[in-house]
Amino acid sequence: MRLLHTSDWHLGQNFYSKSRAAEHDAFLTWLLDRAQEHEVDAIIVAGDIFDTGSPPSYARELYNRFVVQLQQTGCRLVVLAGNHDSVAMLNESRDILAFLHTTVVANAGYAPIELPLRDGTPGAIFCPVPFLRPRELVTSQAGHSGREKTAAAAARHQRLLSGAVSAGLRAARRSAAAHHCQRPSDHRRRQQKRCRPRHLHRHTGCLSGATLPPCRLHCAGPYSPGADGRRLRAYPLQRLAAAAELR
């Protein structure tokens, strides 16, 4: 069996504002001649038939004319979508082109294709793999849509982050509770109502001792998210001698 492999036609492309229509026309004519001269059984176009998802009309005309002329030679055609191609646009004419011995594979999910010889007997089993976009990989691997996978990843990240923050700041909460038993001023009482473990890097003032000299402590927990979404490092806390259990 004779297969002719080609790709990256980029029909409709302009090169430095100059149209490549004449060049593409000459190439497709040459390709037809080679298929007929060597009695090729099938031509495989492995992606990027067009340069954009919305090619100009003359580019579509070149493509359609090539399909019709190739069918007259007895050669089959298999077209795979590339990253420059529009899946929807290629699928528009898929059913019609099937009557012209042309198989269009624009997206994932196609079963292997049997490529017959010119006399109709089986020649090869062809497994087409077009350009795969992230949403197609997500669906085929996990069985979920892209939105479902994104939501699951966000929930998993939130669980891990919450566990890390909880473990890292548990000791700091004990220290803050012990310190709150002191005689804070009215200003500090108001701060205590707002103080939460995730905000310790902002309210270190409510942890400062009135009588005992503070000493520096290594970072009490992991990075804490700021109000504007940035990650802020927690400031070294000031602990009291009464917080001896903090280790």
Image: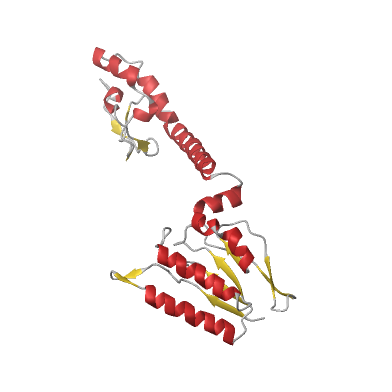
Quarter of the image containing the N terminus?
Answer: bottom right
In the rendering, at what x and y percent does residue 203 appear? 29, 26
Of residue 115 and residue 74, the one placed in the foreground of this image is 74
Where, by quadrant of the figure, is residue 128 drawn? bottom right
Give the residue furthest to the bottom.
37
Quarter of the image containing the C terminus?
Answer: top left
Q: Residue at x 39, y 36 (%)?
A: 221
Count of numbered circles in the view = 0
Q: Residue at x 58, y 57 (%)?
A: 108
In the rendering, at what x and y percent does residue 192 appear? 33, 18
In the rendering, at what x and y percent does residue 211 appear? 26, 20
Q: In this view, does 173 lie to the left or right of 235?
A: right
Q: Is residue 151 left or right of residue 128?
A: left
Q: Residue at x 29, y 15 (%)?
A: 190
Q: In this view, does 66 lie above or below 89?
A: below
Q: Is residue 174 left or right of residue 74?
A: left
In this view of the protein, can residue 243 be seen by the observer? no
In the rendering, at what x and y percent does residue 29 appear? 48, 80
